Amino acid sequence: MSSTTYLIKGVSVLGAEPTDLLVRDGLIAPESEARGAQVIDADGLVALPGLVDLHTHLREPGREDAETVESGSRAAALGGYTAVCAMANTSPVADTAGVVEQVWRLGREAGLVDVQPIGAVTVGLAGQHLAELGAMATSAAKVRIFSDDGHCVSDPRLMRRALEYVKAFDGVIAQHAEEPRLTEGAQMHEGEVSARLGLTGWPAVAEEAIIARDALLAEHVGARLHVCHVSTAGSVDVLRQAKAAGVRVTAEVTPHHLLLTDERATSYDPVFKVNPPLRTQNDVAALRQALAEGLIDIVATDHAPHAVEDKECEWGYARPGMLGLETALSIVLDVLGPDWPLIAERMSRTPARIAGLTDHGHLPAAGAPATFTLVDPAARWQVDPTASASRSRNTPYAGMTLPGRVVATFLRGEPTVLDGKATK
Ligand SMILES: NC(=O)N[C@@H](CC(=O)O)C(=O)O
Ligand SMILES: [Zn+2]
Ligand SMILES: [Zn+2]
């Protein structure tokens, strides 16, 4: 625990009238005890609860050339995050207690954000046999979210069993919704642009059909379902129906699906290749609306670092995925506007609740954990891929000027970012 006490002066909590926050012994303390504190001038800055990413690829173990738990944690802290959920599609796959505990320990050692491992649903992500979900849940990593992300759990019987299994410990299955038979050879969204470019399409219905099926399965067994990276207007309609019927379903949208469209593929620049693919302007509009209304519960980055040789090649050979941790808040600010209570809800409080991360998602107020981020809403910055803390460079926003800059991030009273720079 930090021995340093910080007095954050003149900060606007979620856009409210400026106030002072005293950070002491890991908590926000009553301000009367401010003697000897290190003062941080927060004039013009907004305080948000530390952001929580429910969908991050950290690539360790296996592809430490693309990202490590430490480098990804640093990118996260710089983006205003205090917790990230690490996806299981590593090498070896995080399908055992041993691997999830390794990732969890690496996160603790890096000490920049809380790294909460996600466990695989099936052994080796192969979609054949359930992984040892119970052993991962009772491990030191206390896994509560399970996902074969990168792959869809397409076998309905396996999906049903997984949903039933995790009910015992209030777990959740996070589904990468993609009917594989409908996306064989797919390179981009199936529509006008794919027809023009002559690239094999990934139809919206491949996502929507799985969400509909899984919502029915979740309802049938009374279990929790989370839908990863929702990308189409039709998926929003399915979610609306499922939620109206009382199904225990939550959903996420990525910053890139809120901003970019399939028109980007006309550049043939693989930096825009991602799964699910960038969709149409109509989809973007529906996703924004659904996020504002709460039909889509949260923003998750799907931060997917890839090595240069996997991205700087022909479109057809490139791996899908893009960086997201350092730009997410700026993109959301751009898309939603400075509605700080809404941003806090969608990027911190609700993801913390879904993941069961009780240390996170608290408003910075006396008595709460000092786990928050300070943002300069007036700052604008230009995205420079070479300046990223990630080991990879595949940001789709290179050269763009974005609003909002993270100035500081605190995790349980310890600064992980100060003056816009990581502290370790
Ligand atoms: N989003 C992607 O395009 N890629 C992800 C996998 C995934 O999220 O499905 C990856 O691991 O690279
Ligand atoms: Zn996915
Ligand atoms: Zn992913």
Image (tube, rainbow, N blue to C red):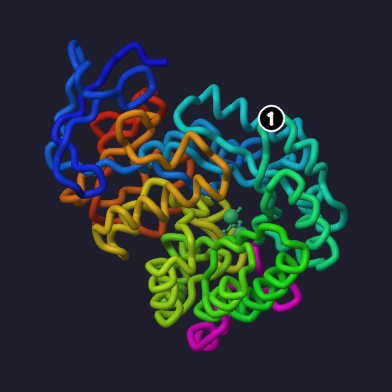
* Residue 306 x/y as whole percent: 54, 49
At horizontal 79% and vertical 40% (from top left) the residue drawn is 134
Vertical order, 121 against 269 (above or below):
above
Horizontal side of residue 403 vs 26, given as left or right: left
Horizontal side of residue 406 vs 76, given as left or right: left
Quadrant of the rendered image holding ligand 1: bottom right
Horizontal side of residue 166 vs 329, given as left or right: right
Nearest the viewer among 78 and 173 is 173
At horizontal 30% and vertical 35% (from top left) the residue drawn is 365
Vertical order, 343 against 187 (above or below):
above
* Residue 99 x/y as whole percent: 72, 34
* Residue 97 x/y as whole percent: 76, 33
- The residue under label 1 is 101
Q: Which residues are magenta?
A: 176-199
The kind of residue on which mark 1 rests is Glu
Nearest the viewer among 286 and 138 is 138
Q: Residues within 10 Å of mark 1 (few under 14, many from 20)?
A: many
- Let me know if residue 245 is in the magenta part: no
Vertical order, 350 against 260 (above or below):
above
Secondary structure category for the residue under label 1: helix
Residue 266 seen in the current view:
no
Nearest the viewer among 134 and 70 is 134
At horizontal 26% and vertical 47% (from top left) the residue drawn is 14
Quadrant of the image for the N terminus?
Answer: top left
